[in-house]
Amino acid sequence: MRTTTYYTIMHSPIDDLLLVSEGDMLTGLAMQQSPKPRAIEAGWKQDAGPFREVLRQLEAYFERELTEFTLPIELRGTEFQKVVWDGLRRLRFGERISYGELARRIGRPSASRAVGMANGRNPIGLIVPCHRVIGSSGTLTGYGGGLERKQWLLEHEASVLAHENGVDVRFPTDARLKPLSASGASLPGLRPSRGGS
């Protein structure tokens, strides 16, 4: 018996998000205005019903009310990719690390390039937080959703943490996506939490 694949589109501060599931398991989250949008396949059924909790948690994330997703997801990929994605899921909200540090954390210290490739194939962006991986110098490096979205997400998380620590920041909850002035941009003071690339 074939499983039905459902999808819906969520409008968000970082543009439209395509959500994909099979029943209760979220299998995809793609940023549709990104350089690599995901195609909606023939046979998929548009229905927001299976995504009620996903939508609730994403809305809470964007409203600065949620810092950890607790959703049933199914990650499909190679065993190595799944190890990398599991490493991503262990990153704390607002934490930033280099590809090299992620490689060390998963026990493959010489595999930073392979980690970068697996990071780029993450099927459930944002919830599996590949945006938290940056270059060893603190620069923003490749992101399937586009560097401007990566920058937005990092600034959003930094502002939530700063607010929780009593620091006044100028990043309103209704802030919309703005393009970067140049590729390879670096956020002020942005450095990996440990190690280099």
Image (tube, rainbow, N blue to C red):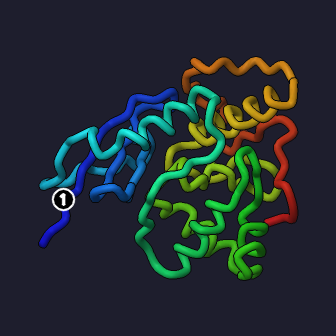
Query: What residue appears at the point 69 percent right and 39 percent down from the top-left corner?
Result: 154
Say if 173 sits above or below 118 in the image: above
Query: What residue appears at the point 69 percent right and 55 percent down from the top-left corner?
Result: 133
Left or right of 124 in this view: 107: right
Could you say where residue 121 lies in the image, as x and y percent from the top left? Answer: 48, 63
Could you say where residue 100 lies in the image, as x and y percent from the top left? Answer: 76, 69
**Within the image, what quadrant is residue 166 found in?**
top right
**Within the image, what quadrant is residue 72 found in?**
bottom left
As shown in the figure, which amino acid type bears the numbered disc 1? Thr
Could you say where residue 191 lies in the image, as x and y percent from the top left? Answer: 84, 49
Query: What residue appears at the point 46 percent right and 79 percent down from the top-left corner?
Result: 78
66 or 196, which is in the foreground? Answer: 66
Left or right of 20 in this view: 95: right
Q: Quadrant of the C terminus?
A: bottom right
Q: Which residue is mark 1?
A: 4
79 or 120, which is in the foreground? Answer: 79
Query: What residue appears at the point 54 percent right and 47 percent down from the top-left corner?
Result: 126
Q: Quadrant of the N terminus?
A: bottom left
Say if 37 sits above or below 85 in the image: above
Number of numbered discs on residues: 1
